Image (cartoon, rainbow, N blue to C red):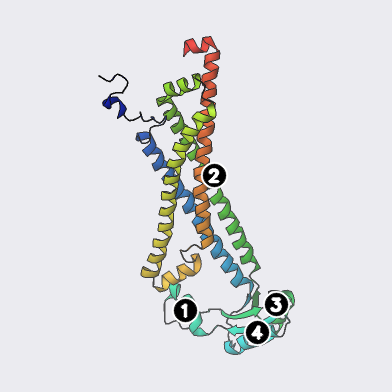
Amino acid sequence: MESGKPRGRLSSRSPRKSTPIVPPSNVQTRALMAVVTIMAFLACLTLGAVSMVRATAASWQDGISREVTIQIKPREGRDMDEALLNARDIALQFVGTVDGRVVDEAATERLLEPWLGTGLDFDMLPVPRLVIVTIDENNPPDFAAMAAALQKGVPGASLDDHRAWVNRLSAMADATTTIGASIMALVFSAMVLTVVFATRGALAGSRDIVEVLHFVGAEAGFVARQFQRHFLNVALKGAFLGGALACLFFVLARFWQRRYLATPGADQTTALFGTISIGWGAYFGILLTIIAIACLTALTTRLTVIRTIREIDLIRSDPERSDNG
């Protein structure tokens, strides 16, 4: 009998695998991942919507700021075609004007078609006619002098330089940004509270293990890193899933708009609200939102664990609180 040799059964025994402090998958983990997915979807959806509205408002402002509109109301005995040409010629005399275009009856009918239908008789309807004047944005004309000259040369003509519309569009874009930022702040706040409760629930389930590890010398940072790594992994999966769903929503919405909304009324809706499409800047913003959600989750988890361990230390140091616990 060779007493020096270890038995074969003992020599073939594999080392015991270490058990993680935080269970890799349980009901709380799946619930947290679902919540993070929903929050990430809402945040990315809000970001994309704000980006889309701001892009549409910017395109409106660019188009409006390059043009002014002369409106001439019909009068009894007035030759409308002659009045339109006179108004255009008067406007083009001013420095800063580039071009002038009379909106003919066919174009006016197309503008009014969604509301009044087709086959309009302009002799029976007192519909104002328009002259579109393109201006130099860097050197705009004197609008007050132009309006006075139009009133003198074509009585009843009015000049609209669209400055009121530009101010309203700018205010609308700013309000949309504020609302979007408020919604994202609420979403992030709700997510932080959810992560705090999930972390405390996981700590409660592993409280004995955490207390033993801390008692034998494990620092709070070491324990926090275990929870932080776990919840960071969960947050990354949920945030990427929510961001991907938001991107898919915009892609499908754009496809639906192109495929099923080829009608005159839909064309007016598109002209008013713009196309359901976001640019690469918005997609990059969605990626940053995903990263921010993951980082915020990891930071919240770390702070929650460290604070909980400090509470454990306070309970140990106070015998009365320990007995009550």
Q: Position of residue 70 (x, y in %)?
A: 62, 78
Counting the numbered discs, the total is: 4
Q: Earlier in the sequence, mark 2 or mark 4?
A: 4
Mark 3 neighbour class, 10 Å CA radius: few under 14, some 14 to 19, many 20 or more: some
Confirm or deny contact between disc 3 and disc 4 (CB under 8 A): no
Mark 1 neighbour class, 10 Å CA radius: few under 14, some 14 to 19, many 20 or more: some
Instruction: Using the numbered discs, state the Cα–Cα distance from disc 1 to disc 2 in whole angstroms.
Output: 44 Å
Q: Nearer the viewer, mark 1 or mark 2?
A: 2
Q: Which residue is mark 1?
A: 110
Q: Earlier in the sequence, mark 2 or mark 3?
A: 3
Mark 2 neighbour class, 10 Å CA radius: few under 14, some 14 to 19, many 20 or more: few
Q: Position of residue 51 (x, y in %)?
A: 53, 59
Q: Nearer the viewer, mark 2 or mark 3?
A: 2
Q: Position of residue 38 (x, y in %)?
A: 42, 46
Residue lying at 50% horizontally and 82% vertically, measured from the top left: 107
Q: Position of residue 271 (x, y in %)?
A: 49, 70
Is residue 123 among the parts visible in the rendering?
A: no
126 or 90: which is nearer to us?
Answer: 90
Instruction: Using the numbered discs, state the Cα–Cα distance from disc 1 to disc 4 in whole angstroms.
Output: 22 Å
Residue 87, labelled with which disc? 4
Q: Is residue 110 left or right of residue 140?
A: left
Q: Quadrant of residue 144?
A: bottom right
Q: Which residue is mark 2?
A: 185
